[in-house]
Image (tube, rainbow, N blue to C red):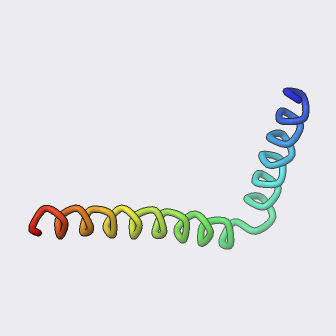
Amino acid sequence: MKIVKRIALALVIAFAVFYLVTRPEDAANAVQGAIGAVWGAGVAVTQFFVELANG
């Protein structure tokens, strides 16, 4: 099972590198979108706890 995970990880990395080389603008947009989603989730969680603490 360990070898399957390594092969899958290698394929994902190879695809990411291929995508980065062949379509750099789209890859940059994908990364910006992912960072934006993580940032938005962090803001939402922070706001939730602030509202929870304010009662």
Residue furthest to the top: 2
* Residue appearing at x 23%, y 62% in the figure: 49
Among the 4 quarters of the image, the one containing residue 26: bottom right
Work out which quarter of the rendered image holds the C terminus and state it. bottom left
- The x, y position of residue 9, in whole percent, is 80, 40
- The x, y position of residue 42, in whole percent, is 36, 61
- The x, y position of residue 29, in whole percent, is 59, 72
Given residues 28 and 34, the one toward you in this image is 34
Given residues 52 and 27, the one toward you in this image is 52
3, above or below 21, in the image? above
Among the 4 quarters of the image, the one containing residue 21: bottom right
> Taking 26 as reference, is 31 left or right?
left
9, above or below 51, in the image? above
- The x, y position of residue 50, in whole percent, is 17, 64
* Residue appearing at x 89%, y 37% in the figure: 7
23, above or below 6, in the image? below
* Residue appearing at x 69%, y 66% in the figure: 24
